[in-house]
Amino acid sequence: MLEKIKFEKFTAFEKLEVKFSSGINIFVGENGTGKTHILKAAYAACDIAKSKGGFAEKINNVFLPSGKQIGRLVKRSSVSSRGAIEVVRRLADDKKIALRLSLSNHTTKPEKATVSGSTKVWLENPMEAAYIPVKDMMANAPGFRSLYEEREIHFEEVYVDIIRKASLPILKGPTDKPRKQLLENLQEAMDGKVTTKNEEFFLRSKHGELEFTLLAEGFRKMGLLWILIQNGTLLNGSVLFWDEPETNLNPKLMRAVIGILLELQRVGVQIFLSTHDYIILKEIDLQATKDDKILFHSLFRNQGTDEIEVASTANYLEISPNAIDDTFGSIVDREIEKSMGGLGK
Amino acid sequence: MKIEADGFYFDFTDAIEVFVFDEKDKKKPTYHGLPMKAVDIVAELADAYVYVEMKDFHDPDLYNQEPAEHDEDVKKKRDNFKWLKNYLKYKYRDSYLCRHAEQKVEKPIHYICLLTLENAQNVIMQKALTRELPVGRASRRWKKEIVASCQVVDVSKWNDNFPSWPVSRIQGAV
C-alpha cells in the first residue's frame, strides 16, 4: 500500500506532503488545487511496479505535457528550477520503500530525469493498480489500444491503461465469496452483467445484450468496476484510483457505488477518489463503520502564499475548508441577498 | 438592541424593538401566556419584522435525509428531518397568527432559522420551508403574503450575511 506522497515544485505544488490512509482517501478542493495530479502521480508509481517501466516515462505519459517535454511538469518559475515527486510505499513485510523522481525545467526527455530510491525493490514487488479517468473509454475500446500503440495520439496513458486492465481475462480459479458478493451487488445496481466480444463491451440484462455505446455513461462506469473486480484487478493489495466518480452517475446509484468501494476497502483494496460531490462525501460518512479507514484530504490555496496546502481528517464534519459545502454556503448567501436585500447589512 | 435566548446572544443594532416571544416573566408586557408554539425572537425594524428560531443540535446528522446504510436508517433520518421541518413551520405559523391578532403584521416578515446543520442540509431545509410555509403570495386568493422570505443558516453564515445583527453563543451554553 502507499504510505505518502511528497511533491516539490511539481505541476501546481510548491511543496506538499500527503499521508495516505490504507483504506479510502478522498480528495476534495476547488478546481486547480491538484487533486487529479496527486492521483496520477501515485498511480504512475503503482503501475510501474507491475509493468516494470520507468517512473519518469510513466509520469510523462500519464501527465502528457506539451511536446512530451517532461521538464514542463516542473512548477513554472521565472528562474531555472528543479522539481521532484517522492512516493513511499509499505510492503507486505511492513518494510517502507521510496521512489523518487527529480527533474529540472530544462529536462526534455524522461531518460534525462533522475529516478532514485529503492527502485529495484519497488519493481521486484509488483502491485495491481487501476485508474478510472473522468471520461469513460469503455465504449471506445475497440481498436483504441492498437491505435495508441501504433500512432501518436494525444491521450493521457491512463485512458489506454484502463482499457488494458478491463480487457484482462477472468482470474483463474473459483471466485471467492466477498468478490462474488460485490459482483452481485453491482449486477443488482446496473441490472445486468458485462460481457466482451472482440474488444467490445456489452451489458447483458433480462432485456438482452446492449453494447456500451448504447448505455448511459453511469452504467458504463459501474460496468467497468464490475470487470475490474471480476478479472481480479481489484484484490487484496490492489490500489484503485477513481477521478470524480460522480461524473455521469445518477446520484441514486451513488449509494450502491460507495457501498461497493467500502467493501473493496474492507477486503484490502486501497482507494483514492477525487470529488466535487456532496453525495459522495455524505454517503461515505453515512455508510462507513468505525473500523473503516477513511481519510478526507482537503486541498486549498493558502490565502497568504497562494500555494496549495492540504488538511487531512478522518472526521467528515471536520473537513476544512470544504469546497463542496462552501458552494452550498454561497447558495445560502445568494438566496439571502435575493430575498432580504440589504436587511441586517 | 441586545437580547439573549436559548444560549445565543444577539445584537440587533438597527432594531426598534426586540423581544423573546415566549416571555416567561408575567410582569413583562410581551408575556402572552397562550398555548401556542412560537418562534424564539421577534425583532422589529423600520421596514420589516424578523422572526428568529434557533435549534442547536448535538447531532446534526440525525436530520440528514440523504440515503443511509439501511432502509430503516433512511426512514429514521427522513422522519427526523420531517419533524424538524414541521417544528420550524408550525412555530412560524403560530407566531404569525398571534401577531396577526396583535395587529402587528403590517410590515414584511422575514423568518430566519439558525441551525447547526451543514450548508447543504440548510439549503434543502430552506427549500422545503419555502414551499410549505409558504413564502410569498402563494395562492391567487391571498391578498397578502404571510412570510416574505425564509432563510436557514448556521452561526457563521448568519454573521457573514447580517453584520448589523451579530450573534454569538453564550459562553458555557451547550
Image (cartoon, coloured by chain):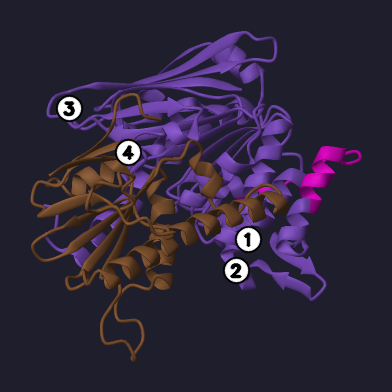
Chain colours: A purple, B brown
The answer for how far apart the CA atoms under marks 1 and 3 are is: 42 Å
**First-in-chain label (3 vs 2):** 2
Tag 3, which secondary structure? loop
Q: Quadrant of residue B167?
A: top left
**What residue is disc 3 on?**
A305
Q: Which residues are magenta?
A: A163-184
**B47, A304: nearer the viewer:** B47
Q: Hey, what amino acid is under mark 3?
A: Thr
Q: Which residue: 69% across, 10% down?
A: A93
Tell me if residue A61 can be seen.
Answer: no
Residue A106 within the magenta-colored segment of the rendering: no
The reply to whether dot 3 and dot 4 touch (C-beta < 8 Å) is no
Establish whether labels 1 and 3 are both on one chain. Answer: yes
**What residue is disc 4 on?**
A33
Q: Which residue: 8% across, 62% down?
A: B46
Using the image, determine if residue A245 lies above or below residue A109: below
**First-in-chain label (1 vs 4):** 4
Using the image, determine if residue A76 lies above or below residue A81: below
**What residue is disc 2 on?**
A216
**First-in-chain label (1 vs 3):** 1
**A325, A54: nearer the viewer:** A325
The reply to whether dot 1 and dot 2 touch (C-beta < 8 Å) is yes
Mark 4 surroundings: few (<14), some (14-19) or many (≥20) residues within 10 A:
many
The answer for how far apart the CA atoms under marks 4 and 2 are is: 30 Å
Number of the front mark, 3 or 2: 3
Q: Where residue A117 sits in the image (x, y, percent)?
A: 48, 11
Parent chain of label 2:
A
Q: Hey, what amino acid is under mark 2?
A: Ala
Q: Which mark is residue A220?
A: 1
Tell me if residue A307 can be seen.
Answer: yes
Q: Where residue A292 sits in the image (x, y, percent)?
A: 64, 30
